[in-house]
Image (cartoon, rainbow, N blue to C red):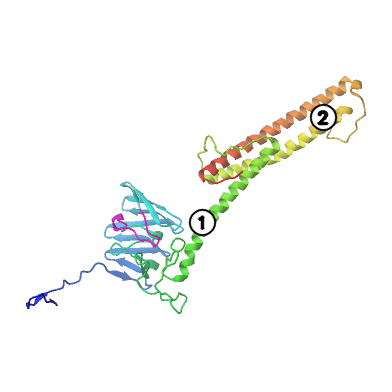
């Protein structure tokens, strides 16, 4: 009973309304959150897999902790995420909705994120907007940028002195279990993605340089064009694999081209002052002046020179065919991945 005393001597009283239950939560023997109000929750490993609310079922689909889609009844929403797995957009038959967060995960209430995954790929609570991390172990408040309850490992266990702290750098760290030691997983995951992308780009650039080097062995004046006129409509992974195969086929042909080119050069030098019999055999030439060449020797020399030229240009064209295919495929990949390539 509350009493108030106005300026007069009269005494007024008013009754406080009884509290209204906003939500109830149930946990299993493993301290995992299994139901929230009338919604039952099921997990796969450490992640939410399914929620059942009466006759309605929601399924959360992801790969390697990266949210991909949410299926609710017959409707499916596709999720677009960043490197921290925060959901930035969801696309459904009803349209596209974009989401924005503060660095610590707060989002305006009008965004309507109540059932879909949101900040760091976690499930926000409809009533409070908090995130029950670690399968309901601790509630994280994105407005206060801290947990509502202390970490059981702090301050004298493996946790830190501040038992309520959230990662100090939320752009590079996350805390999916509610325990401080798990912060590193967010860092490692982001750097793993960045490192893998960087390594892949470096490998593509190295393969492209090898292709250009092979071109130079055939055509010294060749200048690559980094902007392909027509992109090849194949996945990047397939393009890189096929480009590698083309380069592997071209390289032995380039070696043969260079060998034939050397033989032709030797033949041209030899024919100036000597009778050239066969450059592939031990030299058995006889010094003669051009005026003394007989017709048979000249015809033999010319025939062998023509034969070498035919083999030389045939090998060159075969190598160029595979090099051009490799070049076009790699330039498509470079354009698709927006790789910065300084020549």
Query: Which residue is at a point 63% across and 38% down the rendered structure image?
Result: 323
The front one of 28 and 273 is: 273
Q: Where does the image place residue 212, in percent across and percent down from the top left?
A: 64, 41
Q: Earlier in the sequence, mark 1 or mark 2?
A: 1
Q: Quadrant of the N terminus?
A: bottom left
Query: Which residue is at a point 73% across and 40% down the rendered structure image?
Result: 255
Query: Which residue is at a point 51% across and 43% down the rendered structure image?
Result: 336
Q: Main secondary structure of the magenta part?
A: loop
Q: Which residues are magenta?
A: 99-113
Q: Does the magenta segment cover residue 104?
A: yes
The label on residue 193 is 1
Q: Where does the image place residue 175, in percent across and percent down from the top left?
A: 43, 66
Q: Does the magenta segment cover residue 287?
A: no
Tell me: residue 20, above or below residue 317.
below
Which residue lies under the disc numbered 2? 268
Q: Quadrant of the C terminus?
A: top right
Element assignment for label 2: helix
Left or right of 296, for residue 231: left
Q: Where does the image place residue 279, in percent across and percent down from the top left?
A: 84, 33
- The answer to whether any part of residue 128 appears in the image is yes
Among the 4 quarters of the image, the one containing residue 179: bottom left
């Amino acid at each position: 009973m509350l009493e108030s005393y106005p300026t007069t001597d009269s005494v007024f009283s008013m009754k406080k309304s009884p509290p209204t239950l906003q939500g109830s939560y149930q946990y299993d023997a493993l301290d995992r959150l299994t139901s929230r109000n009338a919604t039952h929750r099921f997990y796969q490993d450490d992640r939410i897999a399914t929620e059942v609310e009466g006759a309605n079922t929601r399924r959360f689909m992801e790969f390697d902790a990266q949210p991909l889609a949410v299926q609710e009844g017959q409707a499916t929403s596709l999720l677009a995420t960043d490197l921290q797995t925060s959901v930035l957009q969801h696309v459904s038959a009803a349209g596209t909705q974009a989401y924005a967060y503060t660095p610590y995960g707060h989002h305006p209430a009008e965004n309507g994120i109540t059932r879909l995954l949101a900040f760091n790929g976690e499930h926000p609570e409809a009533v409070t907007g908090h995130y029950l991390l670690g399968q309901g172990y601790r509630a994280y408040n994105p407005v206060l940028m801290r947990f509502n309850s202390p970490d059981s490992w702090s301050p004298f266990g493996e946790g830190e002195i501040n038992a309520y702290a959230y990662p100090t750098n939320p752009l590079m760290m996350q805390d999916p279990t509610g325990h401080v030691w798990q912060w590193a997983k967010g860092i490692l995951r982001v750097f793993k993605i960045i490192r893998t992308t960087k390594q892949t780009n470096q490998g593509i650039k190295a393969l492209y340089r090898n292709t250009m080097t092979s071109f130079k062995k055939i055509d010294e004046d060749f200048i690559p064009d980094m902007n392909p006129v027509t992109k090849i409509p194949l996945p990047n992974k397939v393009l890189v694999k096929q480009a590698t195969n083309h380069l592997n086929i071209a390289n032995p042909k380039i070696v043969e081209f260079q060998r034939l080119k050397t033989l032709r050069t030797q033949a041209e030098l030899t024919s100036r002052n000597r009778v050239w019999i066969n450059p592939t055999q031990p030299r058995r030439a006889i010094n003669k002046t051009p005026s003394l060449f007989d017709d048979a020797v000249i015809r033999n020399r010319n025939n062998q020179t023509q034969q070498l030229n035919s083999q030389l240009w045939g090998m060159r064209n075969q190598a160029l065919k595979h090099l051009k295919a490799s070049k076009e495929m790699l330039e498509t990949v470079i354009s698709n991945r927006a790789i910065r390539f300084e020549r």
